Amino acid sequence: MKVILFEDDPDTGPRLRSEIAKNLPRESSVELFKASALPKFRSIKLYEERLAEEVGSKRYRDATLWATDRDLSRIEHYEGLSEAIISKVAVRFGIPLCKYARGLADDDVLKRQRSWGDSQIVLGSRDLRVLGEKIAIVGKGFEHISGELKKIMPRKKVIAGIRTPSDVMARLLGRSDLVDQIALYSSGDQSMVVEILPFANTLAHVEELKARLPGLLGYWLYDSLLRFPGIMVNEVTAASYLDIAINQFAEAKVRDLFKSAIYEGPFADNSDPHWWRSDLDEIVRTAKATSGRDFANIKLKRRFRGCLDTQTRKRAGFYCMVKQVPVSEDNSVGNISWFPPGADLARVRRDVYDQMGPWLGLF
């Protein structure tokens, strides 16, 4: 696999390239983009055309992922290059792209909370080591998807029974049992899903989509299925759903009780784990327990605290997408316009909805 890094800081670029490479398989490469000073490139007035021409060289060709700083104002020989231009060229070539910033401002965080299905992966950390790990996880995720798609679409054909994006995603994740729930995440304004609907089992259509599928499906998985709790749940949502206090759910012995439900597919991140919700349900059901907390009480022979709404101190059960905290059904609002229909555990706490709704696009 190959990662192309766009970074304008002469000190940060090599350091970040090294951190990314540390987390990739040995045979992988990370290339730091350097704009050419050759007159034949600098004479091209349209920056999109110039970049498209420059990245066509062998050094940058066949990339798994492009990663770009959101601020490229200091890049040499390419005054005016921006992440917006890189995004447009990446879309043209069907190359997955992730953007990063050394610490996101509050307004950037709010913008990410209110948008979904916009084919963007935005990372932020002041620590280059952490940022390198995250970029590598994204790259390996797209590489994994690309490899699995070759199995699903062998010999230029599509395996029988695969007709929709949800069919493909279910096969990619090894969860054909969840295809109907996954389909709920394809509803809404998602351009990448529209591009691959419907599948037609013909050579021309398959070849046209083949190069773009890893990116399209990867964005959908990263920005929707993993981000909005429903099919899968993050750490806070898992604790809220199982009714186990967050700090107690973080204990190794408690995690071990639910380790068979951990998500290990594309973009899986040990620092930000996810669990299959249906598998959590099966663990509790098989033990004939009344809840995740009851199951932990029985297995570890101690009384665990429940997971409470941080405001009302009542049983939580849901997750506030804006505050990123457990929230109760009574103290929150669901069915927000920018939530995928399948994300039934995603809510917005009522005080946030009442006070900030118009500014966050909640209505």
Image (spheres, rainbow, N blue to C red):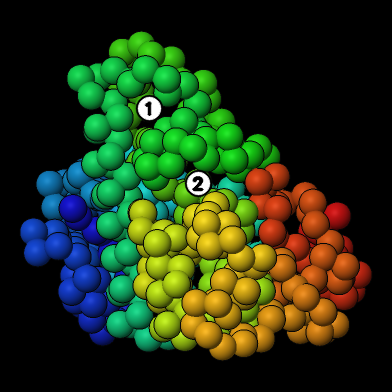
Which type of secondary structure does the marked residue at label 2 adopt? helix
Where residue 237 appears, x then y in whole percent?
A: 61, 69
Where residue 248 appears, x then y in whole percent?
A: 55, 86
For image coordinates 26% across by 49% down, the residue present is 143
For image coordinates 29% across by 26% down, the residue present is 153
Q: Judge by depth and name the residue closer to the eye, 299 or 46.
A: 299
In the depicted structure, whether residue 356 falls above or below residue 207: below
Q: Residues within 10 Å of mark 1 (few under 14, many from 20)?
A: some
Where residue 191 appears, x then y in whole percent?
A: 57, 38
Which type of secondary structure does the marked residue at label 1 adopt? helix
- Please name which of the two marks, 1 or 2, marks the residue nearer to the observer: 2
Q: Which of the 4 image quadrants contains residue 37?
A: bottom left
In the depicted structure, whether residue 253 falls above or below residue 183: below
Q: Judge by depth and name the residue closer to the eye, 22 or 313.
A: 313
Asked whether residue 343 is in view, the answer is: yes
For image coordinates 53% across by 85% down, the residue present is 301
Q: Residue furthest left?
A: 27
Where residue 22 appears, x then y in whole percent?
A: 18, 74
Q: Judge by depth and name the residue closer to the eye, 220 or 9.
A: 220
In the depicted structure, whether residue 288 falls above or below residue 322: above
| Residue 35 located left or right of residue 291 | left
The three-letter code of the residue at mark 2 reads Trp
Q: Quadrant of the C terminus?
A: bottom right
Q: Residues within 10 Å of mark 2 (few under 14, many from 20)?
A: many
The three-letter code of the residue at mark 1 reads Leu
The residue where tag 2 is placed is 220
The residue where tag 1 is placed is 209
Q: Residue 234 got which mark?
A: none
| Residue 103 located left or right of residue 237 | left
Asked whether residue 324 is in view, the answer is: no
| Residue 200 located left or right of residue 245 | left
Mark 1 to mark 2: distance in Å?
A: 15 Å
